[in-house]
């Protein structure tokens, strides 16, 4: 990371990431219960895509790259 992230911005990022991870958890449980469908796929990919983008904007390339690989799965 080439810049320092302010504590407030980091707090916002973490709070937002928790929300996306919670949504992802619910979507994966739906996938397990209901099986694959376009709706469930969108519910899984949406939070991942947003988390990837937010991580990239913050300069957290390790998280961004990891989430990108998860999207590919």
Image: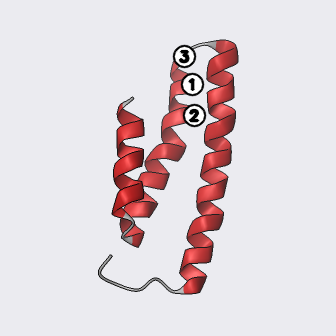
Vertical comparison of 7 with 26: above or below: below
Mark 3: secondary structure = loop
Vertical comparison of 69 with 36: above or below: below
Within-10-Å neighbours for mark 3: few <14, some 14–19, many 20+: few
Q: What's the residue at 40%, 37% (across, down)?
A: 71
* Residues at marks 2 and 3, CA–CA distance in whole angstroms: 10 Å
- Taking the view exactly as shown, the residue that stands out farthest to the top is 35
* Residues at marks 1 and 2, CA–CA distance in whole angstroms: 6 Å
Mark 2: secondary structure = helix
User: What colour scheme governs how the chains and residues are painted in the rendered image of this protein?
Assistant: secondary structure
Q: Kindly indicate the quadrant of the structure image that contains residue 11.
A: bottom right
In contact (CB < 8 Å): disc 1 and disc 2: yes
Judge from the rendering whether residue 49 lies leftward or rightward of residue 26; answer left or right: left
Judge from the rendering whether residue 30 lies leftward or rightward of residue 59; answer left or right: right
Judge from the rendering whether residue 60 lies leftward or rightward of residue 13; answer left or right: left
Q: What's the residue at 58%, 25% (across, down)?
A: 40
Q: What's the residue at 51%, 86% (across, down)?
A: 6
Where is mark 3, residue-wise? 37
Where is mark 2, residue-wise? 43
In contact (CB < 8 Å): disc 3 and disc 1: yes
List x then y, in percent, for residue 35. 60, 13
* Mark sitting earlier along the chain (2/3): 3
Mark 1: secondary structure = helix
Vertical comparison of 16 with 44: above or below: below
List x then y, in percent, for residue 49. 44, 46
Q: Kindly indicate the quadrant of the structure image that contains residue 1.
A: bottom left
* Residues at marks 3 and 1, CA–CA distance in whole angstroms: 5 Å
Where is mark 1, residue-wise? 39
Q: What's the residue at 48%, 37% (across, down)?
A: 45
- Taking the view exactly as shown, the residue that stands out farthest to the left is 2
């Amino acid at each position: 990371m080439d810049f320092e992230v302010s504590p407030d911005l980091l707090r916002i990022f973490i709070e937002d990431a928790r929300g996306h991870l919670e949504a992802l958890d619910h979507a994966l449980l739906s996938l397990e219960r209901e099986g694959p469908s376009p709706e469930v796929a969108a519910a899984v990919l949406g939070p991942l895509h947003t988390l990837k983008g937010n991580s990239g904007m913050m300069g957290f390339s390790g998280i961004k790259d990891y989430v990108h690989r998860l999207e590919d799965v």
